[in-house]
Every structure is written in structure tokens, then in C-alpha cells.
Image: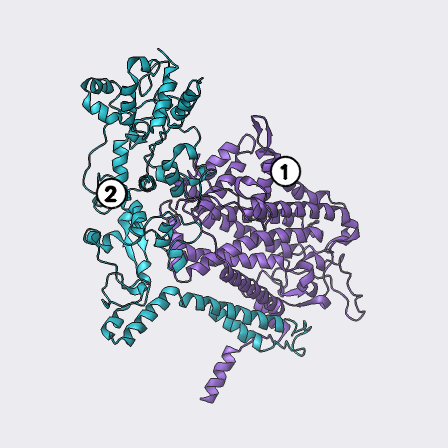
Amino acid sequence: MSNSLRRLWRWVTWTWNPASEREASTAIVENLWLHWFPAKVDEKSFGWRYSLWLGAVSAFLFLILVVTGVLLMFFYVPSTERAYWSIKDIDYVVGFGWLLRNQHRWAAHLMVLVVFLHMLRVFFAGAYRAPRAANWLVGLALLLLTLLLSFTGYLLPWDQLAFWAVTVGTNIAKEVPFVGDGLRFVLLGGTEIGQSALVRFYVLHVVVLPVAVSVLFAYHMWRVRRDGGLAVTDPAAAPLPEPSPTAPVQGKTYSLFGVTPGTSLETRAARPQADDAAVASSPHLLRRLILVFLAVFTLTIILSLISGAPLEEAANPSVTPNPAKAPWYFLWLQELLAVTTIRLGGWTISGGFVGGILIPGVLLLAAAVWPFLDRSPLQTVGVWFPRERRLQNSVFALIALAIAILVLIGVLMRGPYWQLYWPWQAWPQLPSRL
Amino acid sequence: MATLLAVASVAAAAEPAVSGGDTMHRPFAANRDFWPLLIASIASLLAVLAVAYREYTPEWHHDQQAFRRDLLTRGAYAAAALVPNEVEQIWLPALDRVDRCISCHVNYDGSISTLSDLPALYQPHPDLPYMAKHPFPTFGCTACHGGQGYATDEAGAHGLVAHWDDPLLTTALAAQYGLTRAQLMEIKCNTCHRPDDTTPGMDLINMAKEIVAKKRCASCHGIEGGGGLGASDLTYDGDNNPELLDFSAVEGPKTALNWQIQHFASPQKIIKRSGMPNYRLNEEQAKALALLMLSWRRISFPPQYVPAARKRPAVVQPVVREVPAAPPATSPLAVQGRYVFENRGCNSCHRVGGGPLIGPDLAGVTQRRDDRWLATWLKDPAQVVAKDEKLQVWTHEYGDIIMPDQNLSDDDIKALIAYMKEFPA
């Protein structure tokens, strides 16, 4: 009895603890889910301070979104008659439905935020320089896909918030020169937001975009390995300790299969990394990934307990909520659009093009070509805020700050009739029926 | 699943991964993540427990338990066994409604207990005269009472939350307008009973329907595809966005109902220079009409819910026109008359010179009729028409619209006649 209890206890408290380096490597290589990690990782990539683990956080948020999203799909009905009421059912009577929806909502908001912060981190550390420029572009695409995923999900509850946020969003898309109207038509499946728009957004949200993100994410991860891991581990950024004369550093290459010989996929690190700085991914990397996952998971649950996903009145095309706002991550565009709209007497010059298309388009283009224009010394790659990159980092930070401020103004300070209110100021009470 | 994950991770963290320096080539600070992992594991476990607590202790569960306990202490064991332990609902696909009110109001139909001194929450619905025609399985709860049938917590179900514009019609809400709950609920009755001329029990709305017919609202307003084009279409007036109403002169709560009440009581006070005549409605009549307006909504019901066929209102020839300004007056009494003329909306139907509108051109009216006749006419037009066959023929030319009785005072009438005298034919 006591023996079997002890066996049970050992089974429950079993801890992975490889006996040899080979066993540790094999655990990674032979596992479908883990083989994309190298068998050994440079200790520097573990640091909290360098990467902030933002990439891992956004990947885990995506995982939470996929799991909660698939479960939500069992209950959600993408029709204009049923969508809103199926959300009410999810909130009120589906077992743990409120948790699924709240967690999905919070993870979605956080993912937009974290992916953006991840981009800031990569820029500030100059980690987008060749050979990582390609991955920077993939990252930009992932940022856009994340925004699109969140935006398409915004419409699905089919409430006033959804309907009008998407109205604002797709009206901004209309301002694209020449193809704007066509773009909006294709996106909505018509000229108005109705059943066809809902189905299109649904299919984009649950199939097309998640698959696209998954594919690009896989490529993103593969590129990280191929480009030599995190930039902080580059020898240029972190000089190697002098090799001891007794154990000369091999000119070895890491291949995809880590421990097996061969050169199927070589990394393109500037110099081969020393064994001295590397540790086995299993269990060290895995343990930390579990830690990050647990933290992200717990955070989304706590947020879901504190504050639920909003659900306004059922969508009503004839009643515009006051104010009607785009999703928060597009509010900086709406703010720019409102500011660049000029009224001269009875004439109105819409700021849609300048605020909605030109400014974000130029910013995006600049971000895409910057890795190829950056001439700062390579020694700064993988270092936060080096002196040599102070100017470009400051400009980038200022742009990010401006976007953040505009978003905050839009979220907190825009009240009825798009008037400015202080966050502590009460909005005038709008009339109701009864 | 999440619980298992959390438990497993606590267990995993519980045994510090002493990645043996002996076996591993290079130990990576084996214990470095031990405490963070332990804390994160416990935090996630607590979070999952909090989720479970919230999921398994809903308000309705508490209410059902309390009822069961209450019945047991009274010795009503058979009844206690009937108390459900789940979300109960009346599903009305025909009305596109789900009413989960009965998850807490479990004894709504008295099927569990008919004890007389039960707490209010568990008392059965009173057996009112119209209950036989409105059985629960066909009508549910919210169709009459308002509220959010989908919700399973009190605040949400009673619709006393943001973003639900159909709140439970409570005594307190009705009292804000000086109405009883039953009167306020007539709004709900009339969403189905709109086609009725009169409905037993709907006293205020019945009164309102009579006023609408008598005052011939349809000569200016479009109603259900008929009526005039001279004023707003009222067919779905209850659906109008309250934000589009001007509340600057409205006292009290900023609600569509309050706006309607005060507008009916005195149109020109709420909308300056409104073309709508001031019918001098008393408070009750204004409230009745306001309730009627709020009940006119675009809500469709399957045929079995709509009461028997009704009389269509008389088809009124629609009139399109702009409200002309009344010409200026000179003498002080005539100035007063002009004020009455505009303020009571006479100019909505009459011009002074320039030909007829809905009513005849009034230039030279004092030459055609003497003062005494005019005074009698203005006092009660309908009565004058009833006695005068010639006038009946003449009224026919004007689409059978009889001038509304404006409840004018003698001073008003004197002033109006003085004003008219300034405009000979």
C-alpha cells in the first residue's frame, strides 16, 4: 500500500531531469513540438531584460486565442439574426462561456499590445539588421495580421460597438486612392455592413488569418534559428570569452537536428557560438517557457475575472452610438483623421486620406525599408539603446509615443460629439427611452 | 483541463529541478526559476479556483437553494423536492425570446407551492383577468414586463445595466412619470394590441387612441401608411433615437417618454414655432398619448399573437406644405391675436392671403362671418359643423378635416378676431 502510494507520489511529482547532454538533446530533437528549438541555447537568450520575452508572450497569447476561439466557435452563430444572441448565451448560460469570451477578448487586446511592444524592443536593440532584416519584414506582416485578426473579430458580436467600430474602420479603408471603394466592397461583400460582411469577417477571423499567422509564425521561428538566435547572442554584441588553449573552439555549424551530423540547415551566425555559453534547451528553455506561459495564462484569467468583454445593444444601422469609435488600436488613425479634417465654411476636406492612409502608410513603408538604410555599426546589434543609434532610436520612440498618446486621447478623452473630456470629467448624460 | 495544468505545474515546481552538475555538462543555475515557477503555479491555481467559484455559485443557484430551505423549514417536503437546480427558461422561438427569469422566480406559476406567505421572489404571478389569454408558455415574461430574458443575474435580467434599452417596468420607474406600473406596462400591451380600437384594461392607451381619432392626427401625420405628409411619420415613433430629440426645454429625466409627455402638454414649449396645434390636453391625456407613441415600434409578431382584425383609420388626403409665417399685426390686440395664431399652430393649416392650405384662406373671413358666429365656431368647431349642413358640404372639400377644438379662451378668441380684421379680402 505504502509502496504504491509512494509510486503514485513519484508519478505525480515526476520532474524531467535528463541524465546526460545527449538525453537532453534527444528530448528536443525527437519531439514534434519541441524540435524547432535548438538542442542548446545560449545563456544570454534567457535574460529577462534583453528580450522581455515579448515574442514568447505573444505566441502564448495566440495559443490561448486559438484554444478559446475554437471553443467559442462551438457556440457562436455567424448570422445577423443569431450572432448577438448567441453571444448573450455564451455570457450567461454556456458553461464557463463568460471565461472563454473574456479571456479571448483580453488575450486579443494584449496580443496587439505585446506584438507592438515586441517590435519596439527589436528596433531599440537594433536586432533587425542583416541577416535578420527578412525576419523583421515577417514580423511587420505578423503585426498587420494581428491587427486584422483583432479587427475582424471585432465585428462578430454584432453589437453596436462592433457594428460602428467596423463602420469607422472600413470607411478609413475606403480612403485608399483608386482601389479604396473596391477594397471596402470586397471586405464587406457589398456596400453596407450586413450578413455578407459578417460571414466574410468570420471566415477571415477563424480560418484565413489564423492559418496565415501560424504559417508566418513558423517561418518567423525558423528564421530566428537560421539567423543565429537572438541578436544579443551575436558575438559582435557579446564578445566571447577567450578560448582556453586546451579546448579550441570548433568551427562547427549547428544544424537543424542539433546533435546529428550533417549540414541540412546551417545557421548564419557571424561566428560559431562557443559551447561554453550554451545550455541544454531541455529543461532550461522549456522550464522558462512554462513559466512565461503560466504568467500569461494567469494574467488573462485574472483580467477576465476583473473585467468582462463588453456587449452593447444589438447592432442597429439606424442608431449611431455617440461617440462612435474605431477599435482602440486604430484610434490614433481616427484621431489623425479628425485632426486633419478641415472645415472651411460649408466645405469639409476629409482627413481620411492623410490621417487614415498617408501617415500610417508612410510609417509602415519606413519601417519596412529601414533595416536596409540603417548604417550604424554592427557592434550595436543586440544592445539596447547604444550611443551610436541614439538618434534613430529616439525618433522611433517618439513616433511610438505619439501613437500611444493619440490612442490614449481617443480611448479616454473623446466623448459625445467627439468633444474632448478629461478622463475624470463626466460625460453629459445622453437621453434614453424610459 | 486548466486545473490539471495548474496542479501539474505546482507539482513540477515543487521538486526543485536540481539539474545535476554531475550529469549535466554545464548546469544553468538550476534553481533560478524555482520560486517564480512556484509563485506562478500557485497564482494560476488560485485564478482557476476563483473561476470555478464564480462559475458554480451563480445568483439563481443561491435563490433556488434558499427557496428549498425555506420550504423544508415549513415542512413542505413535496414542494421542496420540486425546486429545480438548474437554469430554467421559457423559450419562445416565435417571439425570438428566451426568458430565464424563472431561474430565480421559480414558483412563477405556482406549480411548486401555493403557500400564501412566501417571500416576494417566490410568490406566484397574480391571477389577473387577462392571464388566461396570455399563458406563460406562449408569452413568457419579458414580452409584458420588459427586462433582459437572456440574463441570469439580477441586475442584468432586470435590464438595469448599460446597453439594455428595455428595462424591467417597475413601480419605481413608473413613479418617475407619475404613472402606476400597470399604466407604464400598457406600452408593452400595445405592441401587440396596436390594431385594437379599445382593449380591456388598457385605459390610458384606449384614451390615447380615441384622442388620435378625434383630433385627426392623421390629417398631418403619416400613420401606418396613411395620413398626411405635413408632419413627421408616427408609425414607428417609438423607435426614434432619443438622442435626436431636443431636451433643452424639457424638465425632469432626459427620456423619450418624458419628452413626449411634455411635448403633448405644450408643443410650442418643447419645439419653438412648432406647427402642431396645442390641444390643451390635460396631464393624463398627455401621458396617455406619450405611452401610445412609445408603444409604436417596429416589432413584428407572428399572426397568432396579433389580435383580431380592426377598423382602418379613414384615409386622409396627404397634404404637403410649408408652415407660412403669420403676417404682422398693428394694433396691440391684433398683435396678441397673431401670437395666438402662431402659437396654437393655426398657420399650419391656414394662410392669410395666398389661397387655401389644409383649411381655407382666412383673408376676409371677418367680412364673410360676423363676430358672434366666429366666436361660436372657434369655441367648438365640431358642434357648429354638426348643426350646419352647408358647412358639412364645405368641409368635405377640405378632406373632411374638421378644425381641431383648441380650447381657446374668450380673450384668445377676441384677439384672434381683432387680428383677422386687419386682413380684408
Chain cyan in the figure, letter: B
Q: Which residue is mark 2?
A: B193
Chain purple in the figure, letter: A
Identify the element where label 1 is drawn: helix
User: Does the rendering let one see residue A141?
Assistant: no
Amino acid identity at mark 2: His
Q: Residues within 10 Å of mark 1 (few under 14, many from 20)?
A: some
Q: Are marks 2 and 1 on the same chain?
A: no
Q: Nearer the viewer, residue A204 or B357?
A: B357
Q: Which mark is residue A359?
A: 1
How many tags in the picture? Answer: 2
Q: Nearer the viewer, residue B197 or B64?
A: B197
The residue that appears at 39% across and 65% down in the rendered structure is B58
User: Does the rendering let one see residue A410?
Assistant: yes
The residue that appears at 24% across and 23% down in the rendered structure is B400
Label 2: chain letter:
B
Residue B407 in the image: state x and y as whole percent: 31, 31
Q: Residues within 10 Å of mark 2 (few under 14, many from 20)?
A: many
